């Protein structure tokens, strides 16, 4: 599945705020079509790393290439061109509260395409249906549940058929069944629609179900402590922290606990 | 440079054959760019085919190399067009990707919209929510620069402005403020007239109360009261609305969609502020005069005498300096409200802090600018 040139290349990335360094010298690639999961404890900088990858934050040092272009230096049109090819679901959904779900999902189409209104509506409706919200198109975000809001946010993130889909904790706070359905959706997107998907997640059960590769961020050493297939890491890694993290996942899995 | 284009040079093509059998053959990449081009012509072609045959119309998608969501929307629309013309559709060559993309469109045909409570139009009043995280670097100067640029480009290119939002905000900030402005301005007129009439009566100069009240209202108090009300009502609302969007990451979502928050969120509010403030000030002036006139009835000054005296007392310069001040106040209040909103840190408490600080900053700026204008107008002799 992985073709020669990675979709995302992160090189010597140092990120932080002011004098405070969060992570130092990160290096990793994301291959085309894979489901790539960023793991780490709370506050280790997963969301921050994601925001660097979509150019919302400027790194203290290093570069990030997304779909062949350097997002850390791109400006104006070049930057727009990169952003046009990625979709983002934020940790809190970030649906626009004054717009219906349909209008939320349609907005990227209005911004980036010249399609007739009728076509935009049809596409937005179909994307909502894809995440199981077809019948709620005319609802306001405040009228649906938190899990439904997350799914609607995913529909909005993928309405332009992005090459790379970034999801920040898509299944946090969802019940195990809904979260398993979401996993199936993510798998289908990656396998059938050939999207590259970068996920921040704590949900260990879902990581083993969907991840092709994971990286684990560690706050103490300010770097990546492990990288690879999650099952392989669990069986072979001798790093105690990695072991603890993934083993717990496994036992959680067998006890059918959700978190 | 597009992935679509890079992966294969194959552009989208369609061939329509009317005989022996009506057939529409699609090939290449059916992506959103292709759909933009062919949406209308291809649908027209499909209807013509359907009308020109008695048998079924074949829709051959076997040679499609790629089909995205927009492409599937077109395929689905074509099917519906042909069916609506009363012909059968035979879809041939559907495989993996096309199938996957078409599925939700198929499912939607049987989906009933869920019912929900009727919602008030008021909901549409806040185009925003909240984003965590600080792009703290929205420095004041950067903001003033961006706002100036946005205002400049709005003047040069008024069609870019989101007028719908602007008028919605103007309605909330202006029209809906009329009751409270009426009340305060009326009472202000009453108090001013009453206090000065008591003093003036000692000299038998009750009629000059009209001069006093008119000039102080038009030059000073009308715009000032209006500004303080506007800051409390709308400046605070702007900060809360944008602050909430910031905390909910909606501002970030706008940015990643390629929409500039200043243009999208701030500009309509600032334009509405500029538009509404002078009108409100003018209205406050009128109502204030009315309040004063009512009081003067009690001091034996009839309506006509009072308003005649007002027209004598007032200069055009009194009116226009007041309205000009109101306009600047409107700009300050809306600008500060939006800036504080964008500077919101994360968490719900931060929204409260932004709101408070929007009101406090606005009122300080209003008083400072009022002083500056007093000096300026004095030296200009107006
Ligand atoms: N805008 C910001 N300014 C300053 N510090 C920040 C900012 N955003 C995040 N941080 C800090 O960076 C650290 C990592 O935050 P981040 O949101 O990336 O964590 P996370 O790994 O996503 O955690 P969680 O799993 O809880 O979402 C935290 O200590 C946080 O306080
Ligand atoms: Mg996070």
Image (cartoon, coloured by chain):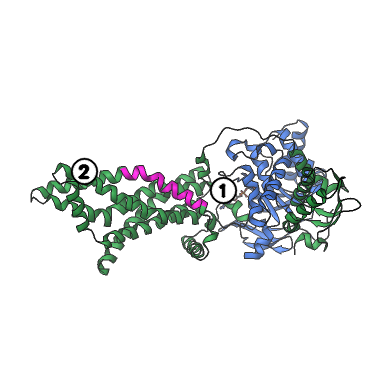
Chain colours: A blue, B green
Q: Chain of mark 2?
A: B
Q: Residue at x 26, y 53 (%)?
A: B217
Image quadrant assignment for residue B328: bottom left
Q: Is residue B149 left or right of residue B282?
A: right
The residue at 65%/59% (across/down) is: A14
- Residue denoted by label 1: B132
Provide residue A216's location: percent of width, then percent of height: 72, 49
Q: Which residues are magenta?
A: B164-182
Left or right: where A225 falls relative to B344? right
Residue A73 x/y as whole percent: 65, 65
Q: Is mark 1 within 8 Å of ligand 1?
A: yes
Front residue of A22 and A81? A81
The alpha-carbon separation of the residues under discs 2 and 1 comes to 53 Å
In the figure, A5 relative to B104: above or below?
below
The residue beneath circle 2 is: B294
Tell me, yes or no, whether the highlighted magenta stretch contains residue B169.
yes
- Judging from the image, mark 1 belongs to the subunit labelled B
* Residue B47: % across, % down: 78, 50
Element type at mark 1: loop
Residue B348 forms part of the magenta stretch: no
């Amino acid at each position: 599945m992985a073709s020669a040139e990675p979709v995302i290349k992160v090189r010597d990335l140092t990120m932080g705020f002011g004098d405070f360094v969060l992570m130092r010298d990160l290096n990793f690639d994301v291959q085309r079509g894979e489901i790539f999961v960023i793991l780490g404890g709370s506050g280790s900088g997963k969301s921050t790393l994601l925001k660097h990858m979509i150019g919302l934050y400027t790194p203290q040092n290093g570069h990030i290439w997304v779909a062949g272009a350097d997002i850390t230096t791109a400006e104006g049109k070049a930057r727009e061109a990169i952003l046009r090819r990625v979709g983002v679901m934020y940790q809190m959904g970030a649906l626009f509260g004054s717009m219906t779900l349909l209008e939320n999902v349609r907005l990227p189409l209005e911004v980036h395409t010249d399609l007739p209104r009728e076509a935009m509506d049809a596409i937005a409706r179909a994307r909502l249906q894809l995440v199981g919200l077809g019948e709620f198109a005319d609802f306001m975000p405040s009228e649906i549940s938190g899990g439904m809001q997350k799914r609607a946010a995913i529909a909005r993130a993928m309405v332009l058929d992005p090459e790379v889909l970034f999801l920040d904790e898509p299944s946090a706070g969802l019940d195990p069944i809904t979260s398993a359905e979401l996993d199936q959706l993510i798998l289908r997107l990656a396998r059938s629609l050939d999207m590259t998907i970068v996920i921040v997640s704590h949900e260990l059960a879902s990581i083993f179900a969907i991840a092709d590769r994971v990286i684990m961020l560690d706050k103490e050493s300010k770097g990546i402590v492990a990288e690879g297939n999650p099952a392989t890491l669990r069986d072979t890694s001798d790093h105690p922290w990695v072991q603890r993290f993934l083993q717990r996942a496994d036992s959680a899995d067998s006890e059918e606990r959700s978190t | 440079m597009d992935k679509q284009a890079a992966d294969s040079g194959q552009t989208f093509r369609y061939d329509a054959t009317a005989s022996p059998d009506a057939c529409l053959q699609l090939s290449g990449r059916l992506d959103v760019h292709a759909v933009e081009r062919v949406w209308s012509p291809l649908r027209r072609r499909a209807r013509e085919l359907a009308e020109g045959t008695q048998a079924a119309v074949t829709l051959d998608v076997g040679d499609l190399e790629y089909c995205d969501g927009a492409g599937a929307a077109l395929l689905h629309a074509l099917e519906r067009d042909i069916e609506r013309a009363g012909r059968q559709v035979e879809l041939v060559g559907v495989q993996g990707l096309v199938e996957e993309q078409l599925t939700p469109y198929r499912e939607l045909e049987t989906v009933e919209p869920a019912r929900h409570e009727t919602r008030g139009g008021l909901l549409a009043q806040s185009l925003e929510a909240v984003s965590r995280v600080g792009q703290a670097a929205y420095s004041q100067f950067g903001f003033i620069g961006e706002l100036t640029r946005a205002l400049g480009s709005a003047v040069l290119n008024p069609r870019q402005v989101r007028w719908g939002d602007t008028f919605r905000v103007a309605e909330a900030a202006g029209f809906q403020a009329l009751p409270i402005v009426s009340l305060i301005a009326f009472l202000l007129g009453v108090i001013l007239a009453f206090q000065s009439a008591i003093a003036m009566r000692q000299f038998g100069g009750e009629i000059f109360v009209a001069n006093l009240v008119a000039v102080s209202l038009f030059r000073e108090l009308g715009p000032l009261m209006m500004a303080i009300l506007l800051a409390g009502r709308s400046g605070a609302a702007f900060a809360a609305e944008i602050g909430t969007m910031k905390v909910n990451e909606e501002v970030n979502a706008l940015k990643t969609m390629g929409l500039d928050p200043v243009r999208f969120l701030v500009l309509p509010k600032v334009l509405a502020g500029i538009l509404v403030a002078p009108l409100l000030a003018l209205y406050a002036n009128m109502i204030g005069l009315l309040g004063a006139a009512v009081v003067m009835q009690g001091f034996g000054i009839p309506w006509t005498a009072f308003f005649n005296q007002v027209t004598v007392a007032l200069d055009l310069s009194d009116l226009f300096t007041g309205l000009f001040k109101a306009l600047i106040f409107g700009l300050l209040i809306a600008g500060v409200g939006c800036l504080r909103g964008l500077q919101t840190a994360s968490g719900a408490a931060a929204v409260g802090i932004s709101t408070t600080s929007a009101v406090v900053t606005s009122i300080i700026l209003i008083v400072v600018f009022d002083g500056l204008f007093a000096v300026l107008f004095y030296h200009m002799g107006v």
